[in-house]
Image: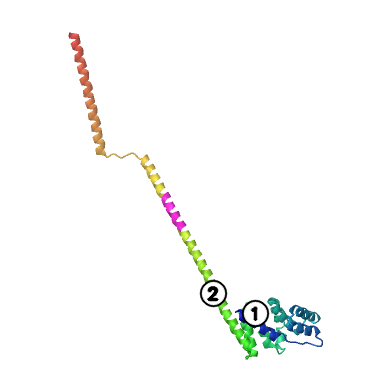
Amino acid sequence: MNCILKYIIAISVFMSAVCVYGQSDRRDVRKGNRDFRKEEFKEAEIDYRKALVKDSVSFAGKYNLANTLYRTGDFEQAAKLFDSSESEALVSGRTADYYYNRGNVAVNMKDYRKAVEYYQKSLLVNPDDLQAKENFIYAKKMLENQDQNQDQDQNKDNNQNNNQNQDSNKDNKQDNNQNRDKNQDQNQDQNQDQNQDQNQGQQPKISPQAAQQMLKAIQAKEKETQEKVNKEKAELYKSRQKDKNW
């Protein structure tokens, strides 16, 4: 991967560091091109910005400044400048180079989907560009890997959500079972208490036969007691008579 990216950068510089002239005097642009060739990119950036101050719609200034920012690693600004000069690039005779360089910027921003599109457009204009073909294959492969990783991450997130839902359902089921057991225990205790209260408030029932037997037993006991009392009284009376006669 690193070798391919370095190779992309090197090719990009060679293809994009061309002298693109506009109208009449473009001394700042030409000076920027000289600094660019010497890889003095900060000085080249200043030169191209000076050219844009004098002519804000200068295609040469925007295009070469975009290439310079690409070399300094400011890919976001480079992309904006390339995008703002697309219409001029399509009529400049440098369409293939423009899309190739725009594809390189997209690769470095890891926007492989756009990179594939830009390399395809470059190859439509110049089908014999081997570097564009190689970069297209690389970007397409990286896009496939990116999509695959996203799918795996999505599946992982879905599995985590499913596991969380299962755990939640399990916890809810356990809570419901615990509440059900608790309610059953409470109901059982209440029923036991009610039965005890009912038993305490009720008198034991006696059948008529048992009641009759109990009555007879009581009467017999009373008769026996009465006879005993009468016997004791008679003996006492006799005792008193003996004492009197003696």
Q: Residue at x 55, y 74 (%)?
A: 149
Which residue corresponds to mark 2? 151
Label 2: how many Cα within 10 Å (few below 14, some 14–19, many 20+): few
In contact (CB < 8 Å): disc 2 and disc 1: no
The residue lying toward the viewer, choosing from 149 and 191, is 149
The residue lying toward the viewer, choosing from 88 and 29, is 29
In the picture as drawn, the residue positioned furthest to the top comes out as 246
In space, the residues marked 2 and 1 are separated at their CA atoms by: 22 Å
Label 1: how many Cα within 10 Å (few below 14, some 14–19, many 20+): many
- Read off the magenta span: 174-186
* Quarter of the figure with the C terminus: top left
The secondary structure that most of the magenta stretch takes on is helix
Q: Is residue 110 magenta?
A: no
Describe residue 216's horizontal placement relative to residue 188 as left or right: left
Task: Label 1: state its secondary structure.
Answer: helix
> Coloured how?
rainbow
Which residue corresponds to mark 1? 106
Q: Is residue 185 magenta?
A: yes
In x, y percent, where is residue 83? 70, 81
* Quarter of the figure with the N terminus: bottom right
User: Which is more N-terminal, label 1 or label 2?
Assistant: 1
Task: Label 2: state its secondary structure.
Answer: helix
Q: Residue at x 70, y 88 (%)?
A: 94
Against 206, residue 121 (above or below) is: below
Inspect the image, locate mark 1, and give the three-letter code of the amino acid beneath it: Ala
In the picture as drawn, the residue positioned furthest to the bottom comes out as 128
In x, y percent, where is residue 126? 65, 90
In x, y percent, where is residue 85? 72, 83
Inspect the image, locate mark 2, and give the three-letter code of the amino acid beneath it: Asp
Task: Indicate which disc residue 86 carries.
Answer: none
